[in-house]
Amino acid sequence: MRDRYARVINYLRFSITDRCNHRCFYCMPPDVEFLAKEKLMSLEEILTLGSIFHSLGIEQVRITGGEPLMRDDVVQIVKAFSKYFRVSMTTNGSRLKDFAEDLKSAGLQSVNVSLNSLDEYKFRQITRGEIKPVLDGIDEAIKNQLFVKLNVVVSKMNIDEVPELAEYASFKGVPIRFIEMMPVGRKNSGAVFEKEILDRLSSFELKPVSVQLGVGPARYFVTSGGNYVGIISAMSKSFCSSCNKIRLSCDGKLYPCLGSTIHVDLLQAIRSKYSHQQIIQLIQKVLESKPYQHDMNNSEIDSKMNRLGG
Ligand code: SAM
Ligand code: SF4
């Protein structure tokens, strides 16, 4: 599939739930209201949409949420999708210890685990979750030979920990990516931009490298110790010109961009018994509306991050 700017779209972020056992301050408020269960896609609906996206040339699917491991049928979803796609997942890691082995057997290739602090107290302040299960989950994923990357959303709360987190990643032998915080449902106060993050990493003597670890937008550097460090600068350096993705929310709405409110409702289409051809036409409509560039520096992301998946 190509959009109207001739960008090849072969990557789908697929949110399977809005539920989460953490409450990261940059993603959802403590008193967030989740969707009624019947508004979420069922397993069958997820698999139907998966086969349609496969027929349109999507090659890579990242399963996200909310927290994807909150869904009991997540292993079945991975198993079915891995017949069509290269399947990866973004998770907060808190349930990964229990799932890593089954996910690997089901065909999951890689997992991005959010790790915003190594300090128990600060981790709780940022996420309202506990750090121990996350560290155990990371170890279990590595043990099961999943390709693990760590994700850190950088804010004023954890900028001082950037070197320590990079050191931890080196010790575990896994790449780490530092992500500029985006304005979800509010102005972006507390955000830290790429320059400051890179300054904090000066002792690692980062050298730019042209590796692609997955199909996401991170730019990578190699440390003097030989580990990969990535930067995802959605705010200070737009990577829109090479954007290859579309996003499906957990209630079946397809968005052309995280910063866009334009969408089509594929779940409603399935439930209204649209034919596959009619659903494909809706998907094509979204591609036509994909903006050349997001405008998140002048606005905030209206869509709820936990429904759409970062
Ligand atoms: N629960 C999983 C997790 O946290 O990894 C997956 C869902 S989460 C919404 C997907 C990704 O979006 C994570 O890497 C998370 O750190 C990122 N994210 C959430 N809110 C963000 C924000 N305001 N700015 C930048 N990244 C954000
Ligand atoms: Fe949950 Fe992930 Fe959102 Fe944090 S970023 S609240 S872990 S969905």
Image (cartoon, helix red, strand yellow):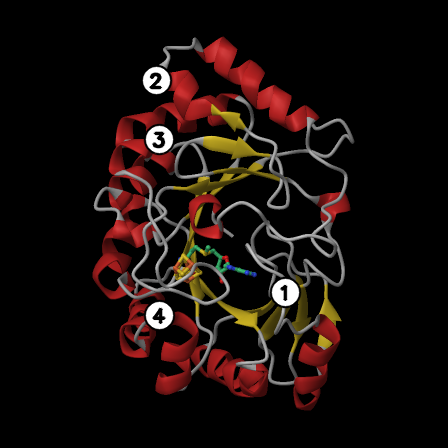
Packing grade of label 1 (10 A; few <14, some 14-19, many >=20) is some
Q: Which residue is mark 2?
A: 271
Closer-to-camera residue (182/222)? 182
Q: CA distance from mark 1 to mark 3?
A: 33 Å
Q: CA distance from mark 3 to mark 2?
A: 12 Å
| Beta carbon of the mark 3 residue lies under 8 A of ligand 1 | no
Q: Which residue is mark 4?
A: 138
Q: Disc 3 residue type?
A: Ile
x, y percentage for residue 211? 66, 60
Packing grade of label 2 (10 A; few <14, some 14-19, many >=20) is few
Q: Which residue is mark 1?
A: 188
Comparing marks 2 and 1, which lies closer to the viewer?
1
Does label 3 or label 2 sit earlier along the sequence? 3
Comparing marks 1 and 4, which lies closer to the viewer?
1
Residue sitting at x 32%, y 56%? 20
Q: CA distance from mark 2 to mark 4?
A: 38 Å
Does label 2 or label 1 sit earlier along the sequence? 1
Q: Secondary structure at mark 1?
A: loop
* Mark 1 and mark 3 residues within 8 Å of each other at the beta carbon: no
The quadrant of the rendering that contains the N terminus is: top right
Q: CA distance from mark 2 to mark 1?
A: 37 Å
Closer-to-camera residue (176/71)? 71
